[in-house]
Image (cartoon, rainbow, N blue to C red):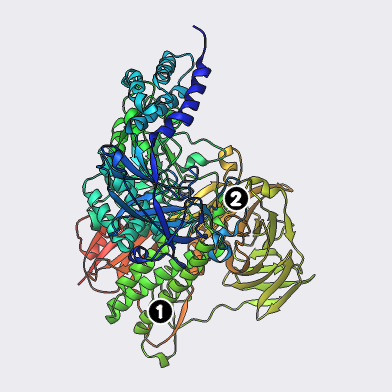
Amino acid sequence: MHDDRELIEARLRRVLDERIRPAIYPESVPLEVSVWNAPDEPVPVAEGLAATPEPIEVGRLWGAPWGTSWFTVSGTVPAEWAGRTVEAILDLGFDENKPGFQCEGLVYRPDGTPVKGLNPRNQWVRVGSPVEGGEEVRLHIEAASNPVILDYHPFLPTNMGEKETAGTDPLYLLTRMDLAVFDETVWQLVMDLEVLGELMHELPADGARRWELLRALGRALDAVDLQDVGGTAAAARAELAGVLSTPAVPSAHRISAVGHAHIDSAWLWPLRETVRKVARTTSNMTALLEDEPEFIFAMSQAQQWAWVKEHRPEVWAKVTKAVATGRFVPAGGMWVESDTNMPGSEAMARQFVHGKRFFIDEFGVDNEEVWLPDTFGFAAGLPQIIKAAGSKRLLTQKISWSQTNTFPHHTFLWEGIDGTRIFTHFPPVDTYNCSMQGRELAHAARNFKDKGVARHSLAPTGWGDGGGGTTREMVAKAARVRDLEGSPAVTWETPAEFFAKAEAEYRNPPVWTGELYLELHRATLTSQAKTKQGNRHSEALLREAELWAATAAVRAGAAYPYAELDRLWKTVLLHQFHDILPGSSIAWVHREARRTYEVVAGELNAIIDAAQRALAGDPSGGTLVFNGAPHARHGVPAGGATRPALPRATDARAREGGGYVLEDGAVRVEIDGRGLVVSAYDLTAGRETVAPGRAANLLQIHPDFPNKWDAWDVDEFYRNTVTDLTEADEVGLEDGTVVVRRSFGASSVTQRLTLSEGRLEIGTEVDWHETEKFLKLAFPFDVHADRYASESQYGHSYRATHTNTSWEAAKFEACNHRFVHVAEPGWGVAVVNDSTYGHDVTRTVEDGGTVTTLRVSLLRAPRFPDPETDQGVHVFRHALVPGAEIGDAVREGWSINQPERRVPGDAEVEPLVAVDDDAVVVTAVKLADDESGDVIVRFHESRGGRARATLRAGFPVAEVVTTDLLERPTGEPRRPEEALSLALKPFELVTLRLKRA
Ligand SMILES: [Zn+2]
């Protein structure tokens, strides 16, 4: 037979595009349109509905950037359409390639009932099926003219990311506002042709099935009269019925489709817009669930549910009704889909506490699945936290974005730092925006790494990022590939249903130990420094607020601020969302975040002040030092207050050859005439810290213009060009502190170096006015080490200092919490910080010695999506700790993040709880969230070894019970004598509930 394959394929494309798709709506009449533009920010629904609109014609521009326009459309269904299906087509100026990134709308009836959301892939509202003819139609559209930030030429700097700089020129062309006849048979024919055509292209050209599809499609096109598509569509469908009913082969890959709309809680739009995006999407999805009985939709991020409940009660009513059917499913159990690299131990835990509690309280749903499709890498401390929250499974697809290495499994056990293993699935479809295209389904089946032993994968299906969700077209396509030869078999299922099948079929899955490092988006550890500082400082203040408020409640009968702490925690948790804390949002989001963190700090400091005043006794009786860190310091116990002890004296003197020498009996530091640390000599160990001939505290600046994703990415080639900032404007001594001033480019920096009790504190104040540059602070150590430790949640993990394999080479920028530690047997050194996360560690061999260089990442200056990223003044605090063992690194890391507080008073405060082994670190002391008055204590082994310790309660305890993170008992209540004698395994995390006697 002659080969006419490409001829028929081209015919299908043209006939679909030019004749069949346009015939879905064969007749239409225009609606009358009027519009009222809200003067500034969005208004309540009732106000939008009550406003008086002015007429506007289709073909006119509307919508200033970030504006809200309330459209009213009205018309009458023509009498001659009686018996037909009629829809309103409402095209606000949509570009179908930009769902979620463009203008959007929510359609209401005149009584304020939400109907459904409008977006580029969802422009219709059903009027009636069948209509009688003569019906009056009146709808209102709350339309948001959100500007496009990520355009066809992506990553160009834009002023659209901030309302004040975005201008007022209207952005969108009102394109179509019609009533139209919807020809369902033609629409079904389009679905048939798309599914079979897409499948055909995925099949081997030498296989019979491909040709069967080609021949059937050819016959169907023959059956279509191009002048009467509607009249011949049924005949064309009949030609396809045979190939559509051939069942899937027995070994076909099985896909659990989960309806989804991954909505970023803020990103290229501000938080307030996400509230509306969620309302639009959930309105859309509740409508689709009513129309499509097989469909299942899952939505994560308790915060987004809470927004609907608080701000859109009329939408919330529909959502709760849909949840009751079991087909609108709360997914995961976190407050937001947070970053997991940077949130501290307790914050990571509280993401689960508040997320799970919301779903339990509202719906009685306690999920075992963690749903993080888009998060930029996963810290090795996470498995233990997932387990402690009562969950056991994880889903993400993000690691498929790695630039260098292909992850070897799609379904596996992920093992964290303490040995906890979590059943994990990476959807092989490699997207959270699956749209049921043949190409996507075939990719999932081909890509699935666990073929032969497992058969199931999950496909999050629906438009996400900016929202929108699943469409009726995706549901129609899924129905056709439920059991179709040549295609994976697709079924709508909940995440829990998928995981149950995947676990059952894969009894002995492979294991991946340690972090799930994303080989991309590494600069998210540094971009938007003030957002990161706000997070770190808020976490420290939350710890202190709980500790001192609990102490004041138990000791002084003070009221515990349950509601305030609950609200403040949720605010901080929201800002850990994976485009806020990582610094990848527009200027508007980060400006608001900076302001929010200031307010949070003010409120938390007020809680701390009130609690400490309640404890401190007579304010005229002298000064007390409150120690909020989990280790004793300067004679003040952890979680207690005493009178201050005198710090050890530090000697400061001029250095021969220029500069200064600082010495305190433990360490002697030499700072040269350039303001660089050329020696940090450990007097106890008799050992030098700084590599021979090198200098620490060296600021280095690199050009930093990644190929894509400016705020997200730093590409490896940035290291090829570097300028050492060795020229000092001034190096002087002020009150025992060496002060170094430098200028470079359009920027300047002042550093203050102070030696105190064996650690060199470095305060760095930068007035930053660079463009596309990366600023690092380098510490070359005379240390021979194959690996280094970075603090993570409830412990630390190791990374290689060498680059033997592509996996190790790819980790050229990584995350730490409070410390990075490098060591040889018997001696180590730590650098601790109060607010930085990004760092790199490299290894060189010079003159026969190994140099291990730690570089702290301070600042970047990307221009997308915020063109002014990080411009202005920043203050960072670091400390170099020579001779630090890992336990010292833990302690010093805490110390720099939890400064002592001096409070007037005379009543020394005994700690509420005390542990007699520094390896056991108490991360939280608080009253139980159930307001029972029980004291909650959470602690972990912090060094990676075994610990035996006794926990002493500074109040009468009736009984003790171990709990999960949600403070739910996990064991039997025990007597305090036995329960408070602790034996911990490496990095083991424990939560105890202490019932007061
Ligand atoms: Zn996202």
Q: Which residue is mark 2?
A: 155
- Left or right of 806? Residue 311 is left
* Residue 759 coordinates in the image, percent (x, y): 58, 68
Give percent across and percent down for residue 63: 50, 58
Q: Counting other residues with Cα less than 10 Å from the Cα at mark 2, is it few (<14), some (14-19), or many (20 or more)? A: some
Callout 2 secondary element = loop
Q: Earlier in the sequence, mark 2 or mark 1?
A: 2
Residue 189, compared with residue 467, is above or below; it is: above
Q: From the image, which quarter does the C terminus lie in?
A: bottom left
Mark 1 is surrounded, within 10 Å at the Cα level, by few (under 14), some (14 to 19) or many (20 or more) other residues, namely few
Q: Which residue is mark 1?
A: 606
Tag 1 secondary structure: helix
When the figure is inspected, residue 892 is found, relative to residue 808, above or below; the finding is below
Amino acid identity at mark 1 = Ala
Task: Examine the rendering and report whether any part of residue 309 can be seen.
Answer: yes
Q: Looking at the picture, which amino acid does disc 2 mark?
A: Phe
